[in-house]
Amino acid sequence: MPIGGGTFTVQNKILPGAYINFVSMGTNAKMGSRGVAALPLELNWGPDDKVFTMTATDFNATSLKVFGYDPTDANILLVREALKRAKSLLIYRVNGGGAKASATVGGMTVTAKYGGTHGNDIMVAVITNVGDAHIENLGGTRQGTLRAKCEIFDHLRPGGLAVLCGDDALLNGLDLPFETLRCGRSEHCNVRVTDIVRRGIDGLDCTVTTPRRSYRLSIPSPGDYMIYSASMAVAIGEYLGLSEQEIVEGVAGYVSTGSRMRRIRLPEDRLIIDDCYNANPQAMEAALEILADTACRRRVAVLGDMGELGPISRDAHLQVGRTTARLGLDAVIAIGPKAAAIAETAGPRAQHFAAIEEALPALRRKFTPGTAVLVKASHAMEFGKIVSELEKCNESTI
């Protein structure tokens, strides 16, 4: 600050300091009106290489989607403060162009929408269930599986969201230092599923009620387990600021990836239910229930080994055979050394084969008009070969 100061018209100052004379021109602008401000910012998330606009009216609703942060987060303090006075803000990210965070799990790669370190932060952690999958490598117990799955919370940022299956006893025992949403049919769930209407192999409808509102969903894939995926999608969609329309249409537009309950319709009412991406005891049970509920003349289950089950392997395969007998399926074809136990308890309509090539002639004979065939095994069994062979079947080859 100068020691001197004040207005002046000629240079006659003797005290040390800086002297600036401002000469203003008349203006018609109205005092008090809110205008436009511009900010060049260093951001660790957000659009690159362009000027984008954030308005005061949209900030609270869209900051998480645009900046990756809640509107109260300290990382976007400058934006929040500027919009207290400005009607709209023109923003340019000066540190854009960085690498986008990515991760690959099970053949699926997920890449952050924008570059920056915030793409490495986990904002939402989801556990859909605790079953027997991979139990051999996780201590041989579901408690070991639970511990392994809970490692995800070590990487969930403070203030993040945990989304859990509210109908899973082990998950209900968790007391987490995060906001937690439990999804399911139980009364204690804060994201609750009700009014389920099953549409056979074509899917199901249900109502999902969150603390904010209710959604009527149409899920285009069969199986009651889909209500958990759908209700969790609703919870996450709300958290990320999606509209009701976006959430409902997103669920309705679901398309299964790979060999996950893929339905292949062939001439003369033949149907292949391709669910051979992987298998565990709980998934086998669910898939067999879907087959049993499918409207058709004959139901055939083609089942293979379930891997990585350790000490429970034989009992698990025996139980799958019992399930097929209870459901009254027309035929069961078990393939693989472990699947021999399925044939033991599946009843007189079951056949066992050591390898896929040995089973194909019998399977082709059973794939008559009006038949639905479920194909399911662990991924290592390569049951996709069976699906490919069945897809070749038509009236001239049966």
Image (cartoon, rainbow, N blue to C red):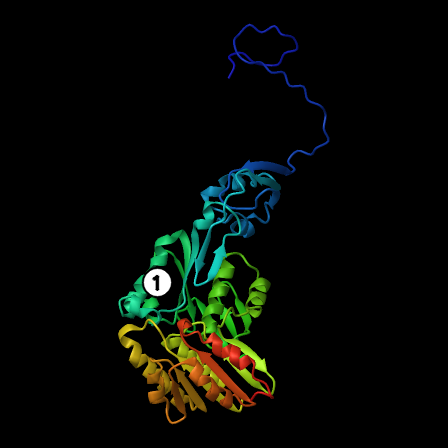
When asked about the image quadrant of residue 377, the answer is bottom left
Q: Which x, y percent locates residue 394? A: 59, 85
Q: Nearer the viewer, residue 170 or 16?
A: 170
Describe the element under mark 1 as helix, strand or loop.
helix
Residue 345 is drawn in which quadrant? bottom left
**Outermost residue toward the front in this view:** 357
Left or right: 299 as drawn, with respect to 83: left
Image vertical order of residue 173 relative to residue 344, above or below: above
Is residue 364 visible in the rendered structure shown here?
Answer: yes
Q: Amino acid at mark 1?
A: Lys
Residue 143 percent coordinates (x, y): 28, 67
Residue at the (43%, 57%) spot, across then down = 124
Seen from the viewer's position, the closer of residues 243 and 256 is 256
x and y percent of residue 336 in the render? 37, 80
Closer to us: 397 or 259: 397
Which quarter of the image is occupied by the C terminus? bottom right
Image side of residue 79 versus residue 184, left or right: right
Residue found at x 49% / y 72%: 259
Residue receiving disc 1:
149
Dot 1 alpha-carbon crowd within 10 angstroms: few under 14, some 14 to 19, many 20 or more: some
Q: How far from the left and from the top, in percent, is residue 68?
A: 50, 49
Residue at the limit of the structure toward the bottom, as seen here? 348
In the visual, does 24 lie left or right of 190?
A: right
Q: Is residue 50 above or below residue 22?
A: below
Q: Can residue 203 be seen by looking at this rendering?
A: no
Q: How many marks?
A: 1
Question: Residue 145 appears in which quarter of the rendering?
Answer: bottom left
Q: Residue at x 46, y 65 (%)?
A: 232
In this rendering, is residue 220 above or below 86?
below
